[in-house]
Every structure is written in structure tokens, then in C-alpha cells.
Image (cartoon, coloured by chain):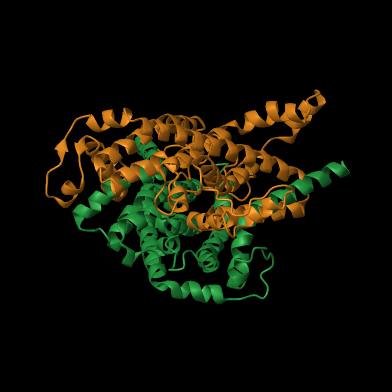
Amino acid sequence: MKTSRLGYNTLGLLVFVTIGFPVYWMLNTAFKPAKDAIDPTPHFIPWPVSLDNFRRALSISDFWGPVGRSLIVSLSTVGIGLVVGLLAALAISRFAFRGRKIVIVGILAVQMVPLVAMIIPVFLLLNDLGQYDKLPGLILTYLTFILPFTVWTLRGFIVNIPKELEEAAMVDGCSRTGAFVRVVFPLLAPGLVATSIYGFIQAWNEYLYALMLLSQQHQTATVWLSNFTTQHGTEYAPMMAGSTMMAIPVVILFLLVQRKMAAGLTAGAVKG
Amino acid sequence: MSAAETTTPKVPPTRHSSPPPGTGPGAGAEPAPASRPGKGRGGRMGGSAVPWALLAPTMLVLGLVMGYPLVRLVTLSLQVFGQPQLWGFKPAEWTGLDNYTSILGDGEFWQVVWRTVWFAGGAVVLTIALGMLIALLLQRVSPWVKTLVNIALVASWAMPVIVAVTVFKWMFDSDYGVLNWLISKLPGVDYDGHNWFATGPQGLTVIMLLVVWGAVPFVAITLGAGLTQVPKELEEAARLDGAGPLGIFRYVTLPILKPIIVMLTTLSVIWDMGVFPQVYLMRGGHPEPEFQLLTTYSYTKAFVVNDYGGGSAIALITVALLLGVVAVYMRQMLKIGEVE
């Protein structure tokens, strides 16, 4: 028994190293002097620690412009998605009406359409609307994937709130809206936060639409990173610094919500 | 503290807990537990005007950004639509099914189809198999190893795709890539300067690894959550009846996890058939013919060759290929009562 545990642990460490390696290698390359990155013998410890790669990454081309645009697009998408999506989520989780099932199946089905397949007509649509290379156009198209996701996830959080709480409030004299605002909304708040952070990550990471629907001068952060080449070809060390800057905020946000999203649904295993 | 924790504090989670929602577009769509007796439709609440009013904004937005483009995709695929039509110099010309017949009669298209099926199939099988193995392994290791592996899983799960692509590009670089150095350490192997992207199959294998690396954490963590719901008594009973570890897995664990596995497999097929940035960026924005998958092929046809009609037809064929998988997925959702 003792030896088999040892074997499993060794295997586990192997899995840890394999899966963690790309992340480690990104950080390692980003923090070591650029010339060490192209040494034929790899340096496995970034020593001396250097921030030159970050400085270089910031100077190659405008960094804050794309980041600002990514922020605007992601925040607006999530904001609109949250307001519009919450209403729809309430409709399908708290009301009985003819056609409800079809709506639910529709929202599920919409999530299954690959974005790539839509890029041609979406491009033409924005072209026709005069929204090519404009941020509002991009925000609108991001709603294609943010909105169904928001509706579906919020629905999951809402069905976990016992209807009895709302009913009790209404018995005590609250109106329907009052019951929602005073009882359901406070309980839903953590779910709203988690959903919006998750939606933000998706919008922030989006690449294809950002690439196709905005011109070079108006690129977003993901496109900035993918265009990371200089006259000297690809400089990998600054590119890893750029990757680190892109990834760190996302990883932190992800860590914040990952458990909450899990908890929300695990507890949801017993609905009613 | 999540909403759920505050509202259902005293009820212990029962079997079939759902994995975390929201892991991509397919997200919330995870297996959720059995049915919800007593909850169901909110019977006594409200007439039918209110819910439709609440749904209206969503339907309006989705109609504009999803419905209209879908219809346009279909009509485009029946038209000759190129540069002149894009600039508005010439009206689009209806050609019936000409786009389809010329694509289906094109040998290159079929090559792309098989390559895509091979690529997506390989990625899905690898993802599910590795995810399952890691989930099983995590049940057997010491807590500190489990924590380490979980950290690695969540870190790679959280990596933006674009970042993952650039990191893999760097690791597999022919001159300074750490992979070539590592492989050259093996006795008798010299991989210095080896170009991983010289041939399609090898390059696509690297891209497949990248896709699998990004997808395994979600599968492993979801299956891990599922495994905790397998009743210990059942395993015990099977063991007493003389089942070996393999037998227990085959006849106890697997049937219980089946709904989750079906879900994960269908989602993975849909995601892996839709792989685009990985190929596009790895090949510097111009995937060579032997790297083309259905997604990049449709893109190239439309935006490089300027044949928007043909590109749309290819996109629609891709969607049609996925319909079967989507049907399985939806059926599973209906079966486990998530969509009641």
C-alpha cells in the first residue's frame, strides 16, 4: 500500500510538471535577461531577475491603447449582457408560460453555433451598418456569446434560490418586484459577480472577431499580442513578457470565481 | 459565500453534483442533477405577457447578432458574392446550389474534411482519456500532490488561448525552443533546429497538444467532481463480489459518470471542430494547405480568395456536420432534466 501511494505520487508530480511547464516557461522567459532566452543551453531559473523584457514589450508598439479598448469592449459587453440577460433568466426560471421550453432549448442551441461560422455574415452586417472598425459594433457582436452564457448561468443561480423565500416576502406584503429586489437580488448578488467576471474573461480573451472587425490602428489586447513581431522578427523574450501581462489579470480573476461558480452549482445539486 | 450556500445551508449535496458552469461558450450547459420535483414551473406566478416582456430584449439582441447573420449565411451560400458585391458595385447574383456542388466536387475540400475529423477526433479522445486518468489519479495521491496538480490545472485552464498559442510557439521554436533541447538530451537523438511545422501532420499534432493542454483541466476537474459522487458502498460491494480495480471502474464508476462523459464529449467535439486561432496564429495568419481545417478553410475562401458565397457554404457544411453531435448533447440535457 505504501509503495503504491509512492508510485501514484510520483505520477502525480509528473502530471504537475507537464501541465504546469508552459506556464512556468512563460514566466521564466519573461523575467530573465533577453540574451539568456536565446542561449543554446536553456536557463531554468530566471536569474538575475530582469524587467527589461517588459519595458521592451511596452515600447515595441502601443500597449495601453489596445488594453483600454479591450477594457471598454469587455466591460460594456458584460454590463449590457448582465442587465438584458438577468431579465431573460428571470423569465425562464420564475415564470411558467407557453413556449418556455422552446426558449430554453433555443438558448442552449445558440451556444452551440461555432463563432467562426458566423464571421462572414457578421462582418458583412457590420459593414452594412457602417459599424466596421467601431467599438460599438464589436460590443454588439460579443453579445452573441456573452448573452446566452449569461442567461444560462444566471438561470442556474436563480433556480437555487428557494421560491418559498419570495413567497414569504409576498405574504408579508411585498409586491412581486419588491420581493425580488429585497429578497432575491441580495442572494443573487454573488452569482451576478461571478457570472460577470467569467463573462469578462471570455470577452477579454476573444480573438477572431477582434481581429476581423477592427483595423490595425484599433486593435484590442489579444490582437496586440498576436501581432508581436518587430523588424528583427519575433523577439520571444519580450513576447513572453507581453503574454505574462495579458495572462496575470485573467488568471487572478479566474481564481476569484472558479470556486464560487463551482460552489453555486454543486449546492444546486439539491434543488428543492 | 455564494448565493447557493446562503440559501440551502442545511441540505448536503447529493449525488451528481454539477461541475462548475461557465467554461466557455457551451458553459452553463453542464450536467446538472436529477430532476427538481416540486419546483418546476412557477405555476401560480403571473400571466404570460410578463415573461415575454422580460425575454424581449434578449431576443431582440440575439435576433440581430445571431438570427440575421444565420439567415444571411444561408442566402450568401446560394449567391455569387465577391469583392464587387462587397463594395456594392454589383448586386449579388443567385446561383442556386452551385457553391455547394463545386465545393463537394472539390478533392481538396474532402481532404480538409478528413483532416478536421482526424484532428478533432484525436483531440477529443486524448482530452477525455487524459482528463479521466488525471481525475482517477487525484483520488489516489497524497493531499499535497493533489493541491499541486490542482494549481497546475487551474493555471492552465485560466490561460487565455492567445497566450497559450504564443507560449507553445516559443517552446516549439526550431532554433531556441526548449522542447528541441530537451528531446536532444535523449541519447542518440539530435533535434537541434528541428522544424515542427515543416509538415502538416507533425505541425497539427503540436497544435492538437496545445488544444488538449488547454482542455484537459476542465475535463479533469469536472470528472473529479463527478467521482466524489460515486457512492463508496457500491465500490465496496463490487470489491467484495470479487471485482478488480478495472472491473469496478468499468461496471460501477463508468455507468455513474456516463451522463457527465457524454456531455463533456459532445462539448469537446463542438469546441475542437471550431478550433481557429490556434491554427491561424501558429501559421502566422496564413495556414499552408496541409494545415487547413474546415474553419480556416472557410475563412481563407471568404477573406483571402474573396469568395464569400463559397466560404459561407463551407461554414454551413461544418455546422451541418456538428448537428448530430448537438442533437446528442441536447438529448442528454433533456434526459437529466436540466431542461424541463
Decide which of A203, B256 is in the foreground and name it: A203
Task: Using residue B92 as the reference point, say whether residue B310 is left or right of it.
Answer: right
**Image-quadrant location for residue A71:** bottom left
Q: Is residue A240 visible?
A: yes
Relative to B4, say whether B93 is above or below.
Answer: above
- From the top left corner, tell me how far across and down residue A29 is, in percent: 60, 66
Colour chosen for chain B: orange
Decide which of B122, A64 is in the foreground and name it: B122
- From the top left corner, tell me how far across and down residue B337 is, in percent: 49, 33
Decide which of B143, B87 is in the foreground and name it: B87
Decide which of B301, B260 is in the foreground and name it: B301
Point out the image quarter for the N terminus of chain B. bottom right
Q: Residue furthest right?
A: A2
Colour chosen for chain A: green
- From the top left corner, tell me how far across and down residue B44 is, in percent: 38, 39
Q: Residue at x 36, y 57 (%)?
A: A210
Q: Is residue B65 visible?
A: no
Point out the image quarter for the C terminus of chain B. top left
Q: Residue furthest top?
A: B241
Q: Residue at x 68, y 32 (%)?
A: B253
- From the top left corner, tell me how far across and down residue B244 is, in percent: 78, 27
**Image-quadrant location for residue B49:** top left
Q: How many marks?
A: 0
Q: Residue at x 81, y 44 (%)?
A: A7
Task: Using residue B83 as the reference point, say whether residue B55 is left or right of it.
Answer: right
